[in-house]
Image (cartoon, rainbow, N blue to C red):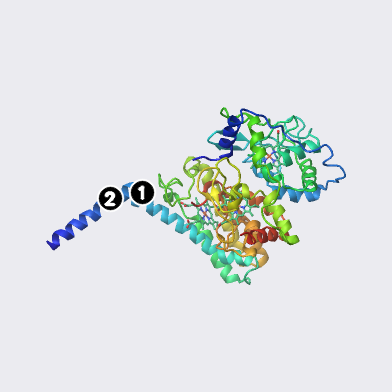
């Protein structure tokens, strides 16, 4: 019943905290100092991060980030905004630091909290260099002048200030899994940070935070029907090659074809290198 | 005495069956659900050797590839209207068919047509060598995925 339960959690917390406002904390002004963005690398990071899965129009080309996709919840409807390079309707006029603060901290240029429907809750773990690369790539994508749609949330879920308390509790940048080898480390960056796999594959607690003790053990589908499958070794007996092939082609070892929101994820992972897909698979196989 | 018991048990059995049937799908609904899932299972069956060749997991064999691709194309092309009996969307046990198949029949027909075309193109060239197979296999995979993305729910 309680889909997207974090939003119920934030209402409870906001009321419980007497509307105490936890101040949004953007990146420090010097966060990007000394970093030279590489737009070509950023194209890969962008594919891994799945930004287009949410920000491209459902029936439009994936490189036009005009927004408009609706995420229907019991509390109202979220709309992914226009993040194309248009200076007025998109984010073309934002500085690199403003964009990085949105992605890595969930804070807007005017200092408001974003809802965790935007998975900065995972991107918070990403490397600043990777995000700077991604932003450089973002700026090469086409502009769209379609205005963003407002969210349509019911009171009290439409009060952003309550998110400060939620973020203080749940916005964590420490890793869940150990990564003793460079391959596992790369896999962990791709899974825990960029690919935000846990946002779908891990269940949430009563206040809507990810339940780290049940990491990747499957969860109700936020968009309603069916369940997101568990992808731990105990649940999925596929080989490393099977997992990598699925992330490239969408085919399971029995040649069923991935559907639902995973099909969108695979549009991104299909663009990664074989090494990156194998690193993701190695990470999953090393989970408890 | 014995006969009475048998009749009583039979009557009980009958009423239990009726009660179950009222709770779940009608025979017609269940048959359609089974049929379409079996049909999909055969897609997977014929696709397997083609996919294994395209992914370099087994050696290319022109005869096996053509036969599988012809069967896949034939299966894609048959009329499937009778599969979509009302009341069998993913809200009922065992079904993963999204309600959009019924509410957006035109969109569904369009992705189905995409699969018909992609499998026909594959059947034309599957016997012409591994490169031809690989080239035509991609669009077939995309045609499965395009439909499952919108019209199939995750399993329960």
Q: Is residue A273 visible?
A: no
- Helix or strand or loop: what does disc 1 sit on? loop
> Is the N terminus of chain B in the top left, top right, bottom left or bottom right quadrant?
bottom left
Closest to the observer, B6 or A142: B6
Q: Nearer the viewer, residue A157 or A143?
A: A157
The chain identifier of the residue carrying mark 1 reads B
Left/right placement of residue A233 relative to residue A32 reads left
Instruction: Evaluate whether residue B89 shows in this view.
Output: yes
Q: Quadrant of residue A91?
A: top right
Q: Percent position (x, y) of residue A172? A: 68, 45
Q: Which residue is mark 1?
A: B24
Q: Residue at x 57, y 45 (%)?
A: A204
- Name the spot of residue A1 as percent of width and height, x first: 49, 40
Give the tally of numbered discs. Answer: 2
Farthest front residue? A17
In the rendered image, the vertical position of residue A203 relative to residue B68, given as above or below: above
Label 2: chain?
A: B
Residue wearing tag 2: B18
Residue B9: percent from left, percent from top? 21, 57
Image coords of residue B7 (percent x, y)? 17, 58
Q: Earlier in the sequence, mark 1 or mark 2?
A: 2
Sort mark 1 into few (<14), some (14-19) or many (20+) by Cα contacts within 10 Å.
few
Real-space Cα distance between discs 1 and 2?
Answer: 10 Å
How busy is the neighbourhood of tag 2: few (under 14 within 10 Å), some, or many (20 plus)? few
């Amino acid at each position: 019943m309680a889909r997207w339960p974090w939003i119920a959690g934030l209402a409870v917390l906001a009321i419980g905290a007497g509307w105490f406002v936890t101040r949004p904390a953007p990146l420090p002004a010097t966060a990007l100092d000394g970093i030279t963005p590489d737009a070509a690398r950023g194209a890969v990071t962008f594919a891994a991060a799945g930004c287009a899965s949410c920000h491209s129009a459902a029936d439009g080309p994936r490189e036009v980030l005009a927004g408009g996709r609706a995420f229907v919840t019991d509390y109202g409807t979220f709309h992914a905004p226009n993040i194309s390079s248009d200076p007025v309707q998109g984010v073309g006029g934002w500085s690199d630091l403003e964009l990085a603060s949105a992605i890595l901290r969930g804070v807007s240029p005017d200092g408001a909290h974003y809802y965790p429907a935007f998975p900065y809750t995972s991107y918070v773990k990403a490397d600043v260099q990777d995000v700077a690369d991604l932003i450089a790539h973002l700026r090469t994508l086409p502009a769209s002048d379609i205005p963003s749609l407002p969210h349509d949330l019911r009171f009290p879920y439409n009060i952003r200030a309550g998110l400060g308390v939620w973020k203080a509790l749940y916005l964590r940048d420490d890793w869940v899994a150990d990564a003793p080898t460079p391959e596992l480390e790369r896999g962990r960056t791709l899974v825990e940070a960029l690919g935000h796999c846990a946002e779908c594959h891990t269940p949430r607690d009563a206040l809507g935070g990810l339940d780290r003790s049940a990491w990747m053990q499957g969860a109700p589908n936020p968009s309603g029907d069916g369940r997101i499958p568990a992808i731990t070794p105990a649940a999925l007996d596929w080989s490393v090659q099977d997992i990598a092939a699925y992330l490239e082609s969408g085919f399971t070892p029995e040649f069923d074809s991935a559907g639902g929101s995973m099909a969108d994820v695979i549009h991104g992972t299909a663009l990664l290198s074989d090494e990156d897909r194998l690193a993701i698979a190695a990470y999953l196989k090393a989970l408890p | 005495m014995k006969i009475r018991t048998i009749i009583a048990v039979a009557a009980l059995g009958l009423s239990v069956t009726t009660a179950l049937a009222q709770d779940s799908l009608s025979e017609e609904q269940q048959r359609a659900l089974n049929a379409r899932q079996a049909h999909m299972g055969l897609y997977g069956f014929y696709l397997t050797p083609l996919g294994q060749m395209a992914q370099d997991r087994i050696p290319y064999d022109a005869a096996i590839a053509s036969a599988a691709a012809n069967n896949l194309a034939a299966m894609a092309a048959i009329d499937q209207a009778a599969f979509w009996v009302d009341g069998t969307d993913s809200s009922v046990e065992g079904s993963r068919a999204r309600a959009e198949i019924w509410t957006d029949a035109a969109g569904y027909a369009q992705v189905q047509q995409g699969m018909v075309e992609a499998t026909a193109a594959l059947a034309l060239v599957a016997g012409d060598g591994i490169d031809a197979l690989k080239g035509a296999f991609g669009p077939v995979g995309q045609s499965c995925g395009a439909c499952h993305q919108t019209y199939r729910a995750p399993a329960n």
